[in-house]
Image: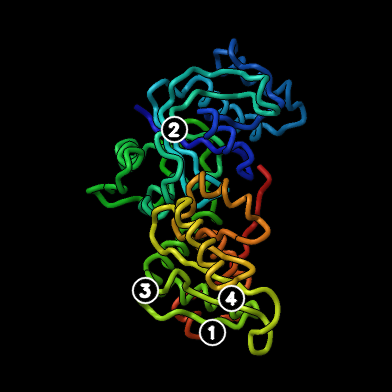
Amino acid sequence: MKAWLVRGGKHGEQESVALENGLACIGFNDVPDLTKVSTKEAMRETIEETYPDASTARVSNSLGQLYAFAQGMEIGDLVAMPLKTQPQIALGIVTGLYQYRTDLGEIHHTRRVDWKRNDAPRTIFKEDLRYSLGAIQTVCQIKRNNAVERLLAISKGNFDPGINAPASSEICEEDMEFGDATIDIEQIARDRIREHIGSEFKGHSLSRLVDAVLRSEGYVTHLSPPGPDGGVDILARRGGVGFEGPRLCVQVKSTSSPADVTVFRGLQGTMATFQADEGLLVSWGGFTQPAQKEARLSFFSIRLWDADALIESIERNYSKLSEEIRNELPLKRVWTLVTED
């Protein structure tokens, strides 16, 4: 058994199709059917014909990923798909050979996958494994630090068992057998921020952090004290003394497991009790697919914040947060050069 990283589009645009149809699918939409292209040399020629103006580096990079997906991946292998739409990773088992599809819109290159788990929070993956899964490639093989055994355990609902030997924080030569696995520095940084918040702002402290973010955005808030909160963690409204604008009711869940439909409906009931106009459900572990689907029906009255959405709000308002919060969560903006290839 091998383990593969397969991304569902640069912006996660293929994730829902992959999960709903039991597929792993990649981009390269312009590349024709590779069913009868069995050698690397023939596949290179196909890619060069498809992208005649591409640099040698881009051709080689595309070749490594497409060959891995069509030929290197085998039935029974593990697939990990980090989700862009949630701070979660989907895990499954490859059940079919490469197929070129014409019935999925712009999606053509596919493999059948039995998704065992589509909502594993990134927080349950240890840092070294998250680092491997932080490669920006669409497809690459993950080998180091007993990745196969660990991903298999997580796919069965367990936490990352880790390794006995010291973990390496660098991509090794093994991981680059199929394609040059460049690391997504932004994602690695986001994971470390997430890990710090998850460790330092547990339970009621996460509500305190959300409250600080809302106050930095101009809300006057009432934060419930620790203990039973009556279904609401924060009440908020804008204005000098909090009498202007819609009334906001906030529920905060700090656990690493995704919030389900029951939690979402609970907020709806709490909003009715407090006569709130709007609701905000913050779930550190993200949301289940049914909860996300039901939330769409209440788009104009309830918002969902997962870990990434909360972190984005923190980054956006960081300079306006209290000194106490900034001391507990010390962040620094870093600029880095982005290379096209």
Q: Nearer the viewer, residue 244 or 33?
A: 244
Q: Which mark is residue 115?
A: 2
The kind of secondary structure element at disc 2 is: strand
Would you say the residues marked 1 and 3 are in contact, meaning their CB atoms lie under 8 Å apart? no
| First in residue order: circle 1 vs circle 3 | 3
Task: Find residue 257 and report its horizontal and vertical position in percent.
Answer: 39, 53
Would you say residue 46 is visible in this rendering? no
Which mark is nearer the camera, 4 or 3? 3
Which amino acid, mark 1? Ser
Please tell me which residue is depicted at 53% across the width and 70% down the height of the picture: 273
Which amino acid, mark 4? Leu
Question: Could you give the CA–CA distance between mark 4 and mark 3, rounded to whole angstroms?
Answer: 21 Å
Would you say the residues marked 2 and 3 are in contact, meaning their CB atoms lie under 8 Å apart? no
Question: Could you give the CA–CA distance between mark 2 and mark 3, rounded to whole angstroms?
Answer: 37 Å
Which amino acid, mark 2? Trp
Q: Nearer the viewer, residue 57 or 139?
A: 139
In the image, residue 143 above or below residue 232: above
- The answer to which image quadrant residue 206 occupies is bottom left
Would you say the residues marked 4 and 3 are in contact, meaning their CB atoms lie under 8 Å apart? no
- The answer to which image quadrant residue 148 occupies is top left
Question: Could you give the CA–CA distance between mark 1 and mark 4, rounded to whole angstroms?
Answer: 12 Å
Would you say the residues marked 1 and 4 are in contact, meaning their CB atoms lie under 8 Å apart? no
The kind of secondary structure element at disc 1 is: loop
Which mark is nearer the camera, 2 or 3? 3
- Location of mark 4 (residue): 214
- Location of mark 3 (residue): 228
| First in residue order: circle 4 vs circle 3 | 4
- Location of mark 1 (residue): 322
